[in-house]
Image (cartoon, rainbow, N blue to C red):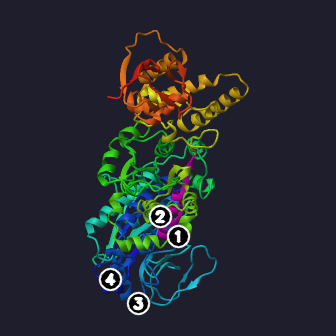
Amino acid sequence: MKFRIDKNLLSEFPDLSIGLLLVENIDNTKAKNDTYQLLWQIIEENAVRYRDLTLNAIENISSWNNAFTKIGINSNEIYPSHKALIKRVIEHNEIPNVNPLVNIYNYISIKYALPLGGHNLDAIDGDITVGQNTGKLKFSPIGKSTQEDVPENEIAYFDNKDILTRNWVWRQSDKSKTMENTQNILIPIDNIGNISSQELSKIILELKSIIEKYLGTEKSIYKFGKVSLKNNEVDLDKLETIKNHLPIRFEAKPVKTDKEIIDTLLDRATEEILPSRQFLEKLLYSGRRLNVYQGFDPTADTLHIGHTVGMRKLRFFQRLGHNVIFLIGDFTARIGDPTDKSAARVKLTKQKVKENLKKYKEQASKLLDFDNKENPIQVMFNADWLEKLDFGDILEITSEFTVQQMIKRDMFKRRIDEDRPIYLNEFMYPVMQAYDSVVMNIDVEVGGNDQMFNMICGRDLTIRLRNKEKAVLPNKLLVDPSGKKMGKSEGNMIMLSDNANDMYGKVMTFTDGMICPAFEILTDIPMSEIKQMQKDMDKGKVNPMQLKKKLAFIITSEHKGDNEAKKAQEYFENIFQKKDTSTEVAIETIISKEKNISILDLLSKVTAITPSNSEAKRLISQKAVRVEGKTVTDKQTIIKITEKGIELRVGKKIKRIKYKTH
């Protein structure tokens, strides 16, 4: 069997050369997901690379457009194969997982912007020629039973009986297509002078290396050749066998499809999945490396325990091998998320945001592996792209949303009903968050279910601007029996900056009804064990206090270490359970200039026993505060301070407060 370029074609294109890789005895039934993952990596890279270019501005496409024009083909209607592929990349249209060899062809074609395909050698009749056909041969389109007539002199690949590829490098025939059972293949790479002969050889060796890694067998043979003006015909049986050569570095980052991890990821602590559980499940089993993110706005100088629910999801995605992004919303934090806010947030300065985010990565690293050598979590900042938008960009993005869409939000409805202001910058928050998904080309967004509106905005914008679906994975929130979520104002929000005693103590304020939901979303205890806990509590077989202490220890240990968790547990048991007052305690006398003062101000401002009102509320809810021997249970209590003084006891801390006017 011979391969040749027609001399008439070479007279039109004297710089034309075709590199040939002939491969025998491969196994095209394995590594389908691995090769698809390799393909998706190059798709993601080139989506960024070509983001600011038009299709026809890409050098290896422009030159092929000119070549098509020269032989009378309208390249705006009939695309060279690599142009069609790269168009799909730029427009974010899916490239299907046909079979391993096709994935590899597409990988090389997209990476180098070159037309490339393979011809099943077992289907070829006689020799293969590239040039003007006689008009007597027929073409069989892929997937169709009928044959097409081909105009005389159309440039094509053809054998002795049929057209194999129409319009030079446009459409391949059903006859020579690569199938899963293909074992022997000829892969031509057409070069019209864009790359050097040496570079073409390197590309062929890279192609060989990939096929060998994923599809090679002990019997596989790899042969190499070229045809050009200098030598327009080669005997395929006499091609040079490729033996030893320097390895070409390429690697598809592995993606796992572990059923246990995927089921846990989809079901545990999950409120809902959009567009559906089935959609995300299919993505996770596709073999594609997904772009997954959760955003964290540094509106405070610490993360809180609620953030860790999503982090646990991110950790699962990382373990499966996906590209996980920990996005710090250093720009959106300056706007302020209006979610659940009855009044506008106070705007933060750029400097304040910068100060707030200092601890974020360190705190998150208790759960997330940022330094993993094989698959590190990326830290990104949305100011990197949001600050660069000009007013024209913003108008274009906001034109994808409507005012009606925004005012459907509950918090905006309430403000309208109460005649409270809604500022335009608050409308911008979900728009800017949505744009994050577009820029990062996100496949899955993770967040609390209170972020549903913002995440759906991101999904809508991704569909419109990237022409792809994005999965939304909202997590359950920890709420009290009335349905109210944990919050700073309630004094039970666990900040990751809390010391071990406070962290442990705040968990102990959870109601019995919050214990099992907290185990589900804040720990890795198996769900079967958590369900048994709930059954045992319902039947009175276990004291909820014991389970709550177990929960408090696990959470504190995860963030502060085992030793600190043990000390915190001992402290709680001594102070709040055993009421241990046997230890000598120095009683400090404090002078108050106020005669009547709220218990919250007394604890946080006058005595500095607690750093804030929220901490004071927690201690009161734990019944840890006593005045003159009586337990304070009401946060609104007003304390009357006399000149003789009163005794304030909080755990082992005892203060005597006296009133003086000066």
Task: Give the alpha-carbon distance from disc 2 to disc 1, as whole Å.
Answer: 8 Å
For marks 3 and 4, give the one nearer the viewer.
3
Q: Residue at x 40, y 65 (%)?
A: 47
The residue most toward the right is 539
| Front residue (pair 535, 45) | 535
Q: Amino acid at mark 2?
A: Phe
Q: Which residue is mark 4?
A: 10
Find the magenta span and give its range.
453-475
Task: Answer yes or no: is residue 110 visible.
Answer: yes
Residue 82 is situated, as x and y percent measured from the top left of the image, at 42, 72
Residue 467 forms part of the magenta stretch: yes
Q: Which residue is mark 2?
A: 427
Picture layout, residue 221 above or below residue 302: below
User: Element type at marker 3?
Assistant: loop
Counting from the top left corner in percent of width and height, residue 55 is at 38, 76
- Determine which residue is flagged by label 3: 72
Kindly identify which numbered label has been placed on residue 126.
none
Q: Would you say the magenta stretch is mainly helix, strand or loop? A: helix
State if disc 1 and disc 2 touch (CB < 8 Å): yes
Q: Is residue 226 above or below residue 310?
A: below
Tell me which residue sits at (52%, 39%) in the image: 490
Badge 4 amino acid: Leu
Q: Counting residues from the N terminus, which is met first, the one under dot 2 or under dot 3?
A: 3
Question: Label 4 crowding class (10 Å Cα cut-off): few <14, some 14-19, many 20+?
Answer: some
- State the CA–CA distance, disc 3 to disc 4: 16 Å
Q: Residue at x 38, y 72 (%)?
A: 393
Q: Residue 657's image quarter? A: top left
